[in-house]
Amino acid sequence: MYANIRPLIGNYKVMSFDTNTVFPNLSSYKTILVQETSFDAAVCRYLGATARGQIIAWLNTGTAQNKKSLIMVGGDLGYNYSRSGSGGRDLVWSETYGKFTYVSDNGATAQNATQGVTIDVGNVRQMTSSPPGGGYWPDGCNVVSGGSSTLYMYQGRTPTDPVAAIGNVQSGFVVASVFQDPRYYTGAFGPVIRAVIGWVQSNGGVITGVNNPNTTSLPNEFSLSQNYPNPFNPATKIKYSIPKSGLVTLKIYDILGKEVTTLINEVKNAGTYEAVFNGTNLSSGVYFYKLETTGFVDTKKMFLLK
């Protein structure tokens, strides 16, 4: 499950996969979310035939009273499962369940944005043409009729050709396919996945452990808050927010600019975080804390008073 989805949904099991993966028994699950990479710095892997067959069989066990729901997210869903010549081509998977046919390797126009149609209506979600890792190719797909609808279109395109996300509602299951890598979004992917989750729920899908998709939001921008308390002795808290995942460093410097310590140096998911700085072994005075992540740098001053 992709980082931006994590803060929205709890009580789930995360499992990595490649083309050889065989899933455990799926009968106890209500919803499956599949997050795939794009063809970029990472090795692109898609669901193999065995795993696809397992999910199809699981979807078909759903009933009107106990629907199964599948959410698929990835910049190459159409390229992998519908494109002629792909090793993962599976027209039953793509056309019967996903309700999509592959059209183009880049469905977006120069505007690089998606726009809500059936969900998130009218809202424009901006995308970058150079996400971390490269590989910006959001698939353009056409809709296969029969229980299907356009969830998102590409801005500047039409709601029918090619589209950015497709929903499929059947008597026993619900499937949503989103043809972008979450890293493509210049803001956060949160508003998009929240809208998709809401659509799944409104059509009978069950997602447990959901923070209310209508009220809970991921941060829309980077921020570094003033530490609290300030002045402090000996410890203080530093709060920061990031709208998308990336490598985050949070370092402390003294008045002369010498690095005192590194509090954070790791990849973080989109969200709001709080770090604790303890100055027990330091002398009173002015210190600075600096947050750095992709596309954002900020520094603030704090006072240690003993």
Image (tube, rainbow, N blue to C red):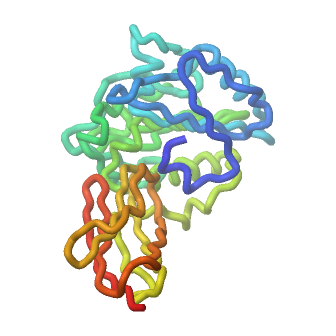
Q: In the image shown, does 28 or 256 lie closer to the viewer?
A: 256
Residue at 73%, 40% (x, y): give it: 30
Q: Say how many tags the image has.
A: 0
Q: Is residue 267 above or below residue 235?
A: above
Pinpoint residue 137: horizontal percent, then vertical percent: 30, 31
Q: In the image shown, does 55 or 115 lie closer to the viewer?
A: 55
> Going by the picture, which residue comes out furthest to the top?
85
269 left or right of 20 in image:
left
Residue at 49%, 47% (x, y): give it: 3
Pinpoint residue 79: horizontal percent, then vertical percent: 39, 21
260 left or right of 168 in image:
left
Pinpoint residue 138: horizontal percent, then vertical percent: 34, 33
Q: Is residue 183 above or below residue 301?
A: above
Q: Is residue 122 visible?
A: no
Q: In the image shown, does 7 or 75 lie closer to the viewer?
A: 7
Quadrant that contains the N terminus:
top right
149 left or right of 282 in image:
right
Quadrant that contains the C terminus:
bottom left
86 left or right of 298 in image:
right
In the picture, residue 98 is in which quadrant?
Answer: top right
Q: Is residue 142 visible?
A: yes
Residue at 40%, 68% (x, y): give it: 240
In the picture, residue 8 is in which quadrant?
Answer: bottom right
Pinpoint residue 222: horizontal percent, then vertical percent: 34, 64
Residue at 73%, 33% (x, y): give it: 172
